[in-house]
Amino acid sequence: MDDLDVTLIRLFAAEPRVGVLEASRRLGVARGTVQARLDKLVASGVIAGWGPDLSSEALGYPVTAFLTLEIRQGSGHTSVAEHLATIPEVLEAFTITGAGDMWARVVARSNNDLQRVIDAVLSEPGIVRSSTVIALATQIPYRVLPLLDAGS
């Protein structure tokens, strides 16, 4: 990535609806250059999507929790991940090292509703045990843009 790529990414991150023509005007490069750069960044996986960022809180899910799951030996992570993918409140899941086998970020409508979400997660026979931590406040929201500066 060069400076134009970084500038282009920053522009679209700040104003996702700017459009290719307007971006080319602002950056002083040809429309075809902007489109080619965007296509290259998408093809290489640097730009992973163009959808809107949604707020789970604004959608009615103000409670965020992190579940550390212990998976039954021999049952594998795939069946557990497939199960978790069927639960809308599971936002992401990772296999991990350490005290557990898998980590999941979940949301719920309330603390009482969180119990329903946890029960749905634990209905998978491959999960032996879970521990839950409830997030109190977001100190740093998910971000990737600082990596552009770190990589330069």
Image (cartoon, rainbow, N blue to C red):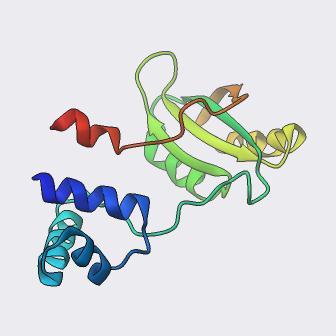
Q: Is residue 96 left or right of residue 88?
A: left
Which residue is drawn at the image coordinates 50% and 33% (left, top)? 102
Which residue is drawn at the image coordinates 19% and 73% (left, top)? 39
Q: Is residue 18 left or right of residue 123?
A: left
Is 131 situated above or below 36?
above
Q: Nearer the viewer, residue 43 or 27?
A: 27
Q: Position of residue 135 (x, y in %)?
A: 69, 30
Q: Is residue 111 left or right of residue 48?
A: right
Q: Nearer the viewer, residue 19 or 133?
A: 19
Is 72 situated above or below 23?
above
Quadrant into which the C terminus falls = top left
Is 26 situated above or below 78?
below
Total numbered labels: 0
Q: Nearer the viewer, residue 101 or 91?
A: 91
Q: Position of residue 124 (x, y in %)?
A: 65, 44
Q: Residue furthest right?
A: 112
Residue 44 visible (yes or no): yes
Picture quadrant of residue 76? top left
Q: Position of residue 121 (x, y in %)?
A: 68, 43
Q: Position of residue 109 (x, y in %)?
A: 82, 49
Residue 1 visible (yes or no): no
Which residue is drawn at the image coordinates 22% and 76% (left, top)? 24
Q: Is residue 76 left or right of residue 31?
A: right
Which residue is drawn at the image coordinates 42% and 59% (left, top)? 14
Picture quadrant of residue 146? top left
